[in-house]
Amino acid sequence: KESILEADFDAIVAAGDRVEPRDWMPEGYRKTLVRQIAQHAHSEIIGMQPEGNWITRAPSLRRKAILLAKVQDEAGHGLYLYSACETLGVSRDELTRLLIAGKQKYSSIFNYPTLSYADVGTIGWLVDGAAICNQVPLCRTSFGPYGRAMIRICKEESFHQRQGYELLMTMMRGTDEQRAMVQESVDRFWWPALMMFGPPDEESPNTAQSMAWGIKRNTNDDLRQRFVDMTVPQAEALGVTLPDPDLRWNDERGHHDFGQPDWDEFMQVVKGNGPCNAQRLVHRRRAHEDGAWVREAATAFAAKASA
Ligand code: 3HC
């Protein structure tokens, strides 16, 4: 019986169709999806912290409103992704507990501090830009609920990316101090943005299997290359330099050659030793505890309503 179900699953993946929650699936497929979707959801929620850091200090009401809306969008992305993950039999409560206990990961990029207001633009331009390169292929991922969540998230990320770029363009047309602030911000975020795509393919234990299952449609290095090729002309139009002396166009390859991120730094950040890892989890734990009364009130109300 199981061999027929496995054949059905393999046929769905081979045809590039969607596996739905009620379909039979190998336990490893389910576990990989829980790991990746949970990590993606956690990234959206933790990502609210570095960006949120500037809401009370935005330079104008317009910039404050834009940033407020963006941070709320990220919360929504987290909720879509937790819901997609729940179709695999894990609860959002359990995933939140694992995150707070440091047992599940979130994207390395959010363990870096947002030290200047220009970082708000740089995160929109580079971090959401990298997220888009990684997430557009995920719209075609083999697991139905994840792919469908990605379609809406990608539309909102593209909007965020344009907003970040417009913010930086406005600053680049400002004073020398503003231009220097943008360049300093780009210098801090460029390499961590490249690390978002994960380790080099030959050091990625999950890529081959995730590609075979249609969870990933491209490898880490493919998407990193796509992001670099997309970003170089944008940096030129902005008037900023990217902090990589090895970055140059390679006519034979039809792509840009570029230097290697500091993979030791990457491993340290992923292990929990980045600049902001501890404070991100302390903040997340406190927010969860401060919100306990809302959950208890909602549960009490639901119990009364159903009594
Ligand atoms: N940060 C933290 N951990 C990372 C990482 C990163 N940038 N890149 C890789 N890792 C971890 C992996 O989770 C894996 O560890 P695990 O097996 O314990 O989970 C290990 O390093 C080896 O990496 P692999 O390449 O083998 O792992 P994956 O096949 O899972 O590939 C990935 C990593 C490309 C990040 C993939 O998980 C993925 O595409 N995830 C969904 C996209 C995502 O999470 N994006 C978050 C971006 S931030 C965001 O979207 C917010 C935006 O709105 C600003």
Image (cartoon, grey):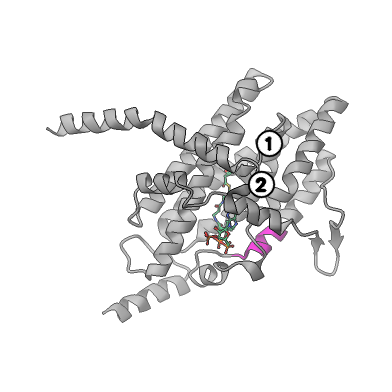
- How far across and down, in percent of the image, does residue 285 sit? 45, 37
Q: Nearer the viewer, residue 194 or 63?
A: 194
Inter-mark Cα distance, 1 to 2:
9 Å
Q: Magenta part of the protein: which range?
A: 218-225
> Relative to residue 238, is residue 33 depicted above or below?
below
What residue is shown at x 67% (from left), y 19% (from top)?
Answer: 60
Residue at the spot of label 2: 129
> Relative to residue 34, is residue 27 depicted above or below?
below
Which three-letter amino acid code belongs to the residue tagged 2?
A: Gly
Quadrant holding the N terminus? bottom left
Quadrant holding the C terminus? top left
Q: Quadrant of residue 124?
A: top right
Q: State the predominant SS element of the stretch in magenta.
A: helix
Labelled pair 1, 2 in contact (Cβ < 8 Å): yes
Q: Quadrant of ligand 1?
A: bottom right
Residue at the spot of label 1: 164
> Relative to residue 14, is residue 40 depicted above or below?
above
